[in-house]
Image (cartoon, rainbow, N blue to C red):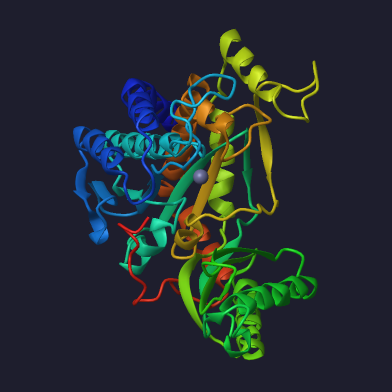
Amino acid sequence: MTTELIAAVIDAHEKELTELSRKIWENPEIGWKEIKAVQWTAKVLENNGFSVENGAYGMPTAIRAVRGSGFPIVGFCAEYDCLPGLSQKACPYPDPVTPGGYGHGCGHNLLGAGCVGAAIALAETLERTGRPGTVILYGCPAEELEGGKGFMARAGAFAECDFTMAWHPAGEDRDSYGEHMSIEEASFQFRGVSAHAASHAFLGRSALDAVQLMNIGCEFLREHVTDDVRLHYEITNAGGAANVVPDFAEVSYMVRALRRETVMDTFARVVKCAEGAAHMTDTSVKVLIKGGFYPTLQNHVIGELVQEARKEIPAEVYTEEELSFADRINRFYPEYEEGVTPPMSTENQALRYEPIFQSTDYGDVQHIRPGFQVREACAPTLFRAHSWSMTASAGSSIGEKGMLRAAKLMAAAAYKLMADPAKLQAAKEEFSAGMAGKSYECPLSDELPWPYGET
Ligand SMILES: [Zn+2]
């Protein structure tokens, strides 16, 4: 059976993949600066017969690696960036390697290595079974920052594929049809007139007043948007001194919702709050759009094939030591119940609709071609994303076992789709129906500079 062959290929590459993941975990690099991660990832791909383009799409930490030929074409979206402040040893209690340092608190070391494993296994299996098909591995920078995939899409990436796949480390084996949120991000820069805050305040026009009034406007706006809308802001410049009326102030906003249209509608109303605040304070405002992500658009046809693969590929088996490690992490969280909370959750759960109140730049890719994101247990049941416990799990054998299974699931589901033209057609028709006659419009304008070097 082909799935067994795929699993055997991944098993044969286990050492290479876990070493890649472990090296990236031990050398966490922030988005746009994933220099070593890219070198190591490219090396593994080259050693396995891929033609690798480093610095793809004009971005030093993007990769486009190709093996195979002909159709269908599948793309796997790897990531390898870390998070600030989440440095942590691979131990079941908070203990940073470097206090305040970088760490893989979202497990992107596993994510990248898992995609590399899937790409290798699928390419090798296509060759062994004499099937045509091209496998592309996209190394995608800075998912935790501005999101490299939008910049890659702006440069034309992903459209060459028939479909794409990705995965993310999670606390259970549960794929979902639910959307991640779409997001739009912008800075609002207010300019006024500075003056002595006591003697000549009547001559001043406060940019900070404008920021505060804009924020108050947006607080009232919250009542008049749909339940899924999320607004968050940070005052990034509040002037400089209490005794000076500030002539400059800046606030940064993120607007999120489950649908792109809702985000853009709400964002337009946030801009009105800014303009109203500028009017009230006799200041001016400039809106600097930083970009945005689409929501995810999980493809059911591909999702069903992942479910099929889940039944064929055994779930992870953990040692007593690993279960005790996971249990010790779970005990840090208030939901923990002695004797009730399982250390790890690897029960295969049915696909269901479940909105996910987070965002990912893989949503953009899913609006260019049909795609599916797998979620596989790589951490204890009560873990938190973006936390010390995720960093600890991502550097442990628990995380690596999940990474290897995710690689098998993605490669197996991709092979099934490539080998079944009717299913591939069905996936494409579902995608077209989901797009409802619209086409992907990159949220990043052509003028928006690529942020490498500024982060
Ligand atoms: Zn992540």
Asked if 54 appears above or below 376 in the picture, the reply is below
Q: Is residue 45 above or below residue 340?
A: below
- Residue 162, can we see it? no
User: Residue 81, percent across and down?
Assistant: 40, 44
Question: Relative to 409, does residue 299 appear above or below in the rendering?
Answer: below
Percent of width and height locating residue 123 = 30, 39
Q: Is residue 239 left or right of residue 155?
A: right
Image quadrant containing the N terminus: top left
Q: Which residue occupies 56% across, 58% down?
A: 296
Q: Residue furthest top?
A: 320
Q: Nearer the viewer, residue 276 or 142?
A: 276
**Residue at image location 74% in from the left, 70% down from the top:** 219
Q: Quadrant of residue 227?
A: bottom right
Q: Residue at x 34, y 51 (%)?
A: 32
| The C terminus: image quadrant | bottom left
Task: Looking at the picture, tell me which residue is in the foreground, 394 or 221.
Answer: 221
The answer to whether residue 91 of the structure is visible from this angle is yes
| Residue 230 pos. (x, y %) | 68, 63
Q: Give the total number of marks visible in the rendering.
A: 0
Which is more toward the observer, 207 or 110? 207
Q: Nearer the viewer, residue 214 or 313?
A: 214
